[in-house]
Image (spheres, rainbow, N blue to C red):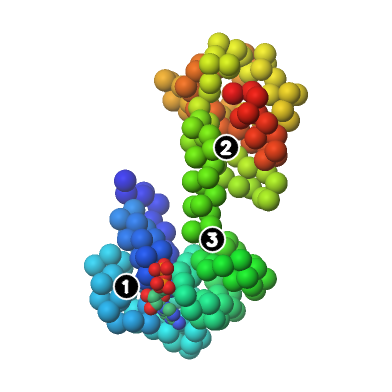
């Protein structure tokens, strides 16, 4: 699907993680500046981006010359070289880039990136491990988003226990302190559920709450 609103992104580091971000953003129709210190990577990704530049991103002058200042969203996808990732993130924030997202290699790296002002730190292996564990532990959980250490939004399939009951009857806010934000039935997604709306088995529910309340709901309420 092409995106109608074209945005400008830059991806630094064209390994597996950065490379897939670069290709996907390009496929979605966005302008992508791709940077790697290895000429080979630059050649490989040239067909999948708008501009491919060979540069060492820890050098502020070099980064400035790449025109990165014109980009308001940059991903630092340097993996193994933690020092280069940290320095690059610092330089980008110094240059005034509004959104800098960075990939962390481990928990220590994640902490440092947070401290120096990365706007989002991702730890793909760790995050994916958690996601897979959730999917393994409950066949009903389709997806989830962590809002903080304590709160999440989960998408799950309604069980027969909920079938035919209205949201008012279920009163999940009182029973579990959780909120149904939306649900999807054959008519599509309803993002402003009404108390009288009845839930059917197999419908997708989007629910927000404290992790321990969500876990209790999955265990007892589903
Ligand atoms: P992944 O685990 O996502 O495959 P890698 O660590 O293998 O990540 O790849 C990171 C990429 O970042 C490599 O292509 C590497 O050449 C590039 N890279 C590392 N340091 C720098 C730097 N200082 N400037 C630009 N690119 C860099």
| Residue 107 visible here | yes
- Callout 1: CB less than 8 Å from ligand 1: no
Q: Which is more N-terminal, label 2 or label 1?
A: 1
Is residue 50 or residue 197 the one in the foreground?
Answer: 197
The Cα atoms of the two marked residues, 1 and 2, are separated by 38 Å
Residue indicated by mark 1: 51
| Of the pair 161 and 76, the residue shown nearer to us | 161
Q: Residue 156, how many percent across, how many down?
A: 53, 31
Q: Position of residue 189 (x, y in %)?
A: 48, 28
| Residue drawn where x is 50% and y is 27% of the image | 157
Q: Quadrant of ligand 1?
A: bottom left
Residue 5 circle label: none
Q: CB atoms at circles 1 and 2 under 8 Å apart? A: no
The answer to whether 126 is drawn above or below residue 196 in the figure is: below
Give the answer, above or below, for where 173 lies relative to 123. Answer: above
Which residue in the protein does label 2 denote?
154
Q: Secondary structure at mark 2?
A: strand
Foreground mark, 1 or 2? Answer: 2
Quarter the C terminus occupies:
top right
Res 43 quadrant in image: bottom left
How far is the residue under mark 1 from the one under mark 3? 25 Å
Q: Residues within 10 Å of mark 2 (few under 14, many from 20)?
A: many
Would you name the residue on which mark 3 appears?
122
The structure residue drawn at horizontal position 54% and vertical position 49%, both measured from the top left corner, is: 130
Q: Residue furthest top?
A: 164
What residue is at 48 percent from the left and 23 percent from the top? 203
Q: Position of residue 220 (x, y in %)?
A: 65, 24
Q: Closer to the N terminus: mark 1 or mark 3?
A: 1
Q: Quadrant of residue 11 in the image?
A: bottom left
């Amino acid at each position: 699907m092409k995106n109608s609103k074209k945005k400008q992104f830059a991806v630094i580091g064209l390994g597996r993680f950065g490379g897939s971000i670069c290709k996907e953003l390009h496929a979605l129709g966005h302008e992508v500046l791709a940077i790697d210190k290895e000429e080979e990577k630059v050649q490989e990704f040239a067909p999948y981006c708008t501009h491919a530049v060979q540069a060492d991103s820890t050098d502020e002058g070099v980064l400035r010359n790449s025109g990165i200042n014109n980009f308001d969203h940059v991903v630092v996808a340097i993996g193994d070289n933690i020092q280069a990732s940290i320095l690059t993130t610092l330089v980008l924030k110094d240059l005034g880039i509004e959104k800098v997202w960075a990939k962390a290699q481990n928990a220590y790296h994640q902490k440092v990136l947070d401290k120096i002002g990365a706007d989002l730190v991702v730890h793909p292996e760790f995050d994916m491990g958690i996601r897979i564990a959730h999917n393994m532990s409950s066949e009903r959980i389709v997806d989830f988003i962590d809002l903080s250490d304590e709160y999440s939004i989960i998408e799950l399939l309604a069980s027969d226990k909920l079938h035919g009951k209205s949201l008012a009857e279920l009163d999940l806010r009182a029973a579990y302190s959780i909120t149904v934000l939306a649900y999807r039935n054959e008519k599509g997604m309803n993002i402003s559920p009404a108390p009288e709306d009845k839930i059917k088995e197999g419908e997708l529910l989007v629910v927000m709450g404290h992790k321990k309340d969500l876990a209790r709901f999955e265990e007892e309420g589903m």
